[in-house]
Image (spheres, rainbow, N blue to C red):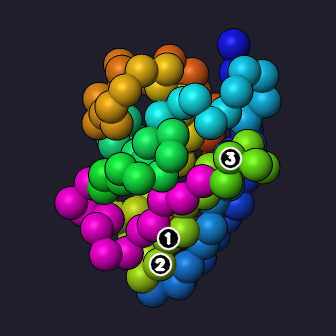
Amino acid sequence: QVQLVESGGGLVQAGGSLRLSCVASGRTFSSYVMGWFRQAPGKEREFVAAISWSGGNIDYADSVKGRFSISRDNAKNTLYLQMNSLKAEDTAVYYCAARTRWPTEHRVRSYDYWGQGTQVTVSS
């Protein structure tokens, strides 16, 4: 079992930046593929980014490529999402998730553990 706790959300103007963090406790963090997902009101949860256990493989949704950057610090059991050039359409609850198998995945059902989410609101 692993527990995931996100932080760093908030209200930001369009064009601004935020950095989300996700701290993991429990089993060995470095053995998990990690991902960020988001869910806007009235919409399904969608993939944002994923990173392999070593950080050597990274995937992004097309909607965030070039603006968001996922990274991890296995020594600190922490996952990050740096979000730049934010747009109003990035407004959502952002979730981190852990997957116990390889490789990185875009599907919600492929992840085994989820955090409680952190709200990101971008004002236009």
- Quarter occupied by residue 87: bottom left
Which residue occupies the extreme top position in the image?
1
Q: Which mark is residue 83?
A: 1
Point out residue 58 in the picture as x, y percentages from the top left corner: 36, 53
Q: Which residue is mark 2?
A: 84
Q: Please identify, in this view, whether the residue under mark 3 or under mark 1 is nearer the observer.
A: 3
Q: Are marks 1 and 2 in contact (CB under 8 Å)?
A: yes
Which residue occupies the extreme left position in the image?
62
Q: Using the numbered discs, state the Cα–Cα distance from disc 2 to disc 3 in whole angstroms.
A: 23 Å
Left or right: 18 in relation to 34: right
Image quarter hosting the N terminus: top right
115 lies above or below 39: above
Q: Secondary structure at mark 3?
A: helix
Q: Secondary structure at mark 2?
A: loop
Q: Which residue is mark 3?
A: 74
Question: What is the three-letter code of the residue carrying label 1?
Answer: Met
Q: Residue at x 29, y 36 (%)?
A: 106
Q: Secondary structure at mark 1?
A: strand
68 lies above or below 42: below
Q: Are marks 3 and 1 in contact (CB under 8 Å)?
A: no
Mark 2 Cα shell of 10 Å, populated few (<14), some (14-19), many (≥20): some
Regarding residue 119, the answer to whether it shows in the image is no
Question: What is the three-letter code of the residue carrying label 2?
Answer: Asn
Left or right: 17 in relation to 91: right
Q: Earlier in the sequence, mark 2 or mark 3?
A: 3
Q: Residue at x 32, y 65 (%)?
A: 64
119 lies above or below 103: below
